[in-house]
Image (tube, rainbow, N blue to C red):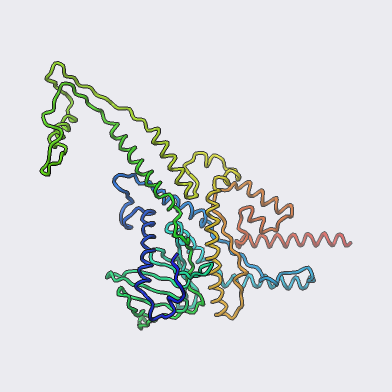
Amino acid sequence: MLQYNHDFFEDRESIDISFLRQSCVNVLAHREELMQRYSRKEDANTLMSSDTERILTSFERYIANIVKGHFAGKPPIFEFSLPRGEQPTARMDDSQLNAVNEELKQIQEEYKWYLEPTIEQYKEAFVTAIHDYSVVGAGYIHIHQDEKGFIVVTPGNALNTVVIYDFSPNPEPIAYVRIWADAEGEQFLELTLRDERRLYNGSNEQTPFLEYDLEGNYTKVMYKALEWGYLPIIPFEDMNGIAVFEPALEHIDAFEELMYRVLQMARQGSKLRGVFKGLTPENERMVYNEDGEQVLNPLFDQEMGGLDDQRWFFLPYDDAGLDFKNPSLDFGSMLEYLQYLEELIVTLCFTPDMSDKQFAGNTSGRSLGYKMFALSQYKTYTERIAREATARLMKIVTRRINKNTGTSFDYRTVSIKFPPNQPEDETAQMERGQRAYLTGFLPHKKSLEIAGIDPYEPEILAFIKEQEELMGQERGIEIRKIMR
């Protein structure tokens, strides 16, 4: 996490762009290194590869995708309610209760209608942000407004973007920087503040933006004014910049090196060894080169290599002999150590070992809960970051909606849930939801959530409404019978 005082950006004309650039480059270099460990590719057009004395075993990719899938495999759930202080109370009569309930419904529908396009875009960008957060320790979502005035939410690139925070107890974003190079190789730095955006060239001099109109004509502007009221970016960032697989990098290196050694031993052990008795090679094994260093004699190597190709050997001495030995190799201890390293790697990264044969053997809810326990602990920390980021999105977007439409929606009336994407005992889950509803302990929607069903799907909402109306009619019939 990069932190500056607000004073650094106070005088816009004298910002130390050189210092800012170097600070951001250092952060991006660390992220690029982590991305290289994840991808194991020089670029998109090359194959994944490792050092010559390793066997590529991409634990990094496995770990990052397990975490991303567990946390972002199911989209966030947004729920709407009345602002605090306007909930129904026991003192209200039936007409007042009906009025409040009608107001709740109208607020839900209207606010949801305004937010629905943003929420759908956010769900898509959320997956990319969590992926980048898992791989490089930071993910970003940008907010902007298109030429028609619609709010647009798009995923950012953590490999060219750095958010700068202040030093408050809960650090707040005060600026963000994007660094990129054009087709000619010149590097640009784009600085975005709360109220404006500026562009600087490779010499750290301010350069104009090119603003295009609908007819393709452009004008040069030195800065772009912003009216969001907040920095228009949603950061998902670990304050220490730690990727999910970073604690186990040395153990992954050890695993790959040991795999290579096991393979080399297996290759060497698969060859027969010839033992000659009473036969002296024609060439010396070791000779001295021009620098006086002792090296393997190429003639000796050629002579021995020729023996490998022979099917018959003629030995000129009476006491000469030829024998072949096939050495026995014991990989048991090495394979045990490899298993130990694998378990240690996934433990350090809070991920389950999917190669465990017992993982899929027991599908009971309690058993799966224990197996996913470590990942659930990591999700608790990640969820706090995601919750703050999503609340920031709601605050920024709601402010713009209120400004554009003259409404007074409160972003705090939106609650967000992050359901985990993990194996479930669906039969037991459905039974729990059914029992919760039939016993009357919980309302219909909450019981459906326990049963693993999204109660806010349009079809489910229609079904709930239909069932509630039927239940209301049945209760009315029973009341009329009693009154008679």
Picture quadrant of residue 135: bottom left
Disc tally is 0
Spot occupied by residue 110 in the image (x, y as percentages of width and height):
61, 73
Image vertical order of residue 382 relative to residue 23, above or below:
above
Residue sitting at 12 percent across and 44 percent down? 291
Q: Residue 138: x, y in percent?
A: 45, 62
Horizontal side, residue 152 vs residue 445: left or right: left
Q: As displayed, is residue 197 above or below residue 63?
A: below
**Which quarter of the figure is the C terminus placed in?**
bottom right
Report the front residue among 423 and 376: 376
Q: Quadrant of the N terminus?
A: bottom left
Q: 369 or 437, which is in the foreground?
A: 369
Side (left or right) of 6 relative to 47: right
Residue at screen point 74% across, 52% down: 439
Viewer-side residue, 210 vs 342: 342
- Residue 441, percent from left and from top: 73, 55
* 36 horizontally vs 115: left or right: left
Q: Does residue 228 appear to the left or right of 271 in the view shown?
A: right
Single out the residue that lies furthest toward the right.
484
